[in-house]
């Protein structure tokens, strides 16, 4: 299976649920003689911030971090609200929520399949930040 970025996964999920494409924004914070960079992404009207701050040469990591956070929110929302059911699916909301949790588990790289897993077990936790 080919590698797919969190940004691509988020765009695919937005397309699947027929919602507007995610909009990324880069933000900076001057810290003494250096500048820390992060990212925010707007999905379906909700703004999600990356969990970490990054060096300027790692701006894509900031966008990946924000996309991962937003994707988790999107699948958690889909399992909580039937209003965000996939366009291709005509199943009941209970099977929709279990498929949403399973899809997020697959995107997140396996594990228990719980969309609300702790940040310590997240792949982003090992990337570090500022």
Image (cartoon, rainbow, N blue to C red):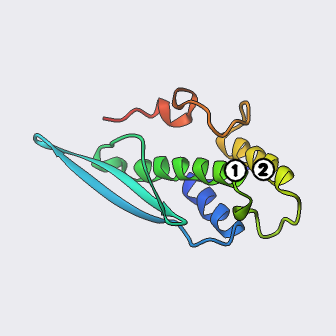
Identity of the residue furthest to the left in this view: 33
Left or right position of 68 against 86: left
User: Judging from the image, what secondary structure is the residue with disc 1 in?
Assistant: helix
The percent coordinates of residue 129 (x first, y second) are 36, 35
Q: Nearer the viewer, residue 84 or 15?
A: 84
Which quadrant of the figure has residue 26?
Answer: bottom left
Q: Against 80, is 31 above or below?
A: above
Identity of the residue furthest to the top in this view: 120
The percent coordinates of residue 84 (x first, y second) are 70, 63
Q: Nearer the viewer, residue 44 or 30?
A: 44
Q: What residue sits 82% from the left and 69% below the top?
A: 88
Q: Against 82, is 120 above or below?
A: above
Q: What residue sits 37% from the left and 62% below the top?
A: 25
Left or right position of 17 against 62: right
What label does residue 80 carry, if any?
Answer: 1
Give the number of the mark in front: 1 or 2: 1
Left or right position of 105 against 49: right
Q: What residue sits 55% from the left and 66% below the top?
A: 44
Which residue was labeled with disc 2? 97
What label does residue 14 carry, if any?
Answer: none
Q: Nearer the viewer, residue 77 or 105?
A: 77
Residue 59 visible in rendering: yes
The percent coordinates of residue 89 (x first, y second) are 84, 65
Asked whether the residues under the numbered discs 1 and 2 touch, taking CB atoms below 8 Å apart as contact, a structural biologist would say: yes
Comes first in the chain, label 1 or label 2: 1
Crowdedness near tag 1: few (<14), some (14–19) or many (≥20) residues, C-alpha within 10 Å: some
The percent coordinates of residue 24 (x first, y second) are 43, 63
């Amino acid at each position: 299976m080919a590698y797919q970025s969190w940004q691509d996964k988020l765009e695919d999920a937005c397309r699947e649920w027929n919602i507007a494409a995610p909009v990324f924004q880069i933000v900076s914070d001057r810290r003494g003689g250096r500048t820390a960079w992060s990212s925010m992404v707007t999905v379906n009207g909700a703004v999600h911030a990356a969990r970490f701050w990054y060096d300027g040469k790692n701006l894509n990591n900031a966008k990946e971090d924000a996309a991962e956070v937003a994707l988790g929110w999107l699948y958690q929302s889909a399992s909580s609200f039937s209003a965000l059911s996939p366009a291709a699916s005509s199943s009941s909301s209970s099977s929709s929520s279990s498929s949403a949790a399973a899809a997020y588990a697959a995107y997140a790289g396996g594990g228990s399949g719980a969309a609300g897993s702790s940040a310590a077990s997240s792949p982003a936790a090992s990337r570090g930040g500022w």
